[in-house]
Image (cartoon, grey):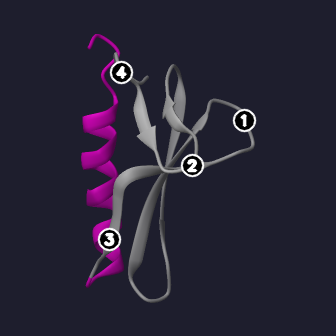
């Protein structure tokens, strides 16, 4: 659940409400974190949530940190 102010995306600006979070990693080690409205089809890239990892196994830790930052149902 996004808190007050929502989540800024590169694609559509701010999204709010109940969201699904997904982290993806490419073959070159680059990763991107995306959100979608719950049960929607479209995914949006979270602004500032992309980079490169030396070890693909680190994606789980990145995802956990981003989920903790973005999940602010009480503000």
Q: CA distance from mark 4 to mark 1?
A: 20 Å
3 or 1: tag closer to the N-terminus: 1
- Residue 71 in percent (x, y) is at 34, 28
| Eye-nearest disc, 1 or 2 | 2
Position of the N terminus, as image quadrant, is top left
15 to 32, vertically: above or below: above
Element under disc 2? loop
Query: Mark 3 = which residue?
Result: 51
Q: Which mark is residue 40?
A: 1
- Residue 38 in percent (x, y) is at 63, 29
Residue stretch in magenta? 54-75
Other-residue count near label 3 (Cα within 10 Å), few / some / many at <14 / 14–19 / ≥20: few
Q: Residue at x 75, y 43 (%)?
A: 41
Other-residue count near label 2 (Cα within 10 Å), few / some / many at <14 / 14–19 / ≥20: few
Q: CA distance from mark 3 to mark 1?
A: 25 Å
| Eye-nearest disc, 3 or 1 | 3
Query: Mark 4 = which residue?
Result: 5
Other-residue count near label 1 (Cα within 10 Å), few / some / many at <14 / 14–19 / ≥20: few
Other-residue count near label 4 (Cα within 10 Å), few / some / many at <14 / 14–19 / ≥20: few
Q: CA distance from mark 4 to mark 3?
A: 24 Å
Asked if residue 72 is among those painted magenta in the image, a careful observer would answer: yes
Q: Are marks 4 and 1 in contact (CB under 8 Å)?
A: no
Q: Nearer the viewer, residue 28 or 63?
A: 28
Image quadrant where residue 69 sits: top left
Q: Which mark is residue 11?
A: 2
């Amino acid at each position: 659940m996004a808190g007050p102010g929502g989540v800024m995306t590169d694609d559509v600006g701010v999204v709010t409400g109940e969201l699904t979070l997904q982290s993806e990693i490419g073959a070159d080690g680059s990763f991107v974190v995306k959100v979608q409205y719950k049960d929607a089809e479209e995914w949006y890239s979270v602004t500032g949530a992309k980079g490169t990892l030396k070890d693909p196994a680190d994606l789980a830790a990145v995802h956990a940190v981003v989920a903790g930052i973005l999940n602010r149902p009480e503000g």
